[in-house]
Image (tube, helix red, strand yellow):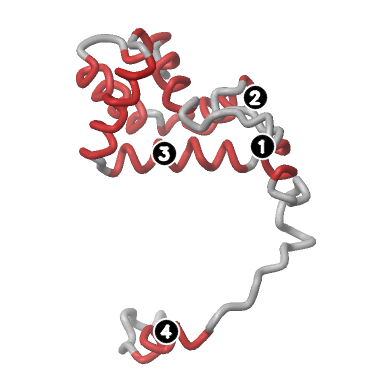
């Protein structure tokens, strides 16, 4: 799993989604949300560890020990380099944040799973799919 310094760095990254008193939501570094992030990484923590190691290398030491202004600069540098591991970690943080009941309520959504009730999806312009439908088959039949 993650070392103590890596956990602190991950929490600092998560806290870049700040709390808002106006909307009544916690930061992504909130205990419940952060616990969900750690649990969600689980056995697939390898990409997250790679990102956190890169973050410490860019910081020249433990990322969590930097002041806020330097953290922001190092995080921006990390974003510029991008990569699949960073996308994975970002997606995990956002997924855990937006499935928190407090965040769901602030968005005017009932905090529940989509099945079996479902959610209303606003209808869009289905003609946007016409170019995709016009493409030739990209697969072969299983039979």
Q: Position of residue 98 (x, y in %)?
A: 60, 42
Task: State yes or no: discs 4 and 1 in contact (Cβ < 8 Å).
Answer: no
Quarter placement of the C terminus: bottom left
In the drawing, what numbered circle is on residue 143? 4
Pick the front one: 90 or 85: 90
Q: Mark 4 vs mark 3: which is more N-terminal?
A: 3
The residue drawn where x is 27% and y is 24% is: 74
Which mark's residue is nearer the viewer, 2 or 4?
Answer: 2
Residue sitting nearer the eye, 111 or 25: 25
Residue 10 location in percent, x, y? Answer: 42, 22
- Is residue 35 shown left or right of residue 101? left
How crowded is the residue under tag 2: few (<14 C-alpha within 10 Å), some, or many (20+)? few
The answer to which of marks 1 and 3 sits earlier in the sequence is 3
The residue tagged 3 is: 90
Decide: few, some or many residues near mark 3? Use Cα within 10 Å; few <14, some 14-19, many ≥20: some
Q: Mark 1 highlights which residue? A: 100
Identified at 31% across, 89% down, the residue is 136
Per the image, label 1 sits on a secondary structure element best described as loop
Q: Are marks 2 and 1 in contact (CB under 8 Å)?
A: yes
Which quadrant holds residue 65? top left
Residue at 38% x, 17% y is 68
Residue 138, above or below 40? below
Please give the residue where the numbered disc 2 appears in the rendered image: 32
Q: CA distance from mark 4 to mark 1?
A: 43 Å
Vertical relation: 52 (above or below) 142: above
Spatial CA distance of label 2 from label 1 is: 8 Å
In-image side of 57 versus 125 (left or right): left
What secondary structure is marked by label 4? Answer: loop
Which comes before the other along the chain, label 2 or label 4? 2
């Amino acid at each position: 799993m993650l070392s103590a310094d890596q956990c602190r760095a991950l929490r600092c990254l998560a806290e870049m989604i700040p709390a808002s008193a106006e909307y009544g939501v916690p930061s992504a570094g909130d205990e419940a949300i952060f616990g969900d992030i750690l649990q969600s990484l689980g056995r697939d923590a390898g990409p997250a560890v790679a990102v956190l190691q890169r973050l410490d290398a860019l910081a020249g030491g433990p990322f969590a020990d930097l002041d806020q202004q330097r953290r922001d600069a190092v995080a921006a540098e990390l974003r510029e380099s991008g990569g699949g591991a960073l996308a994975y970690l970002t997606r995990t943080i956002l997924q855990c944040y937006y499935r928190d009941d407090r965040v769901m309520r602030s968005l005017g959504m009932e905090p529940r799973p989509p099945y079996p009730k479902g959610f209303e999806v606003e209808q869009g312009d289905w003609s946007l799919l016409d170019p995709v439908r016009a493409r030739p088959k990209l697969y072969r039949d299983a039979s």
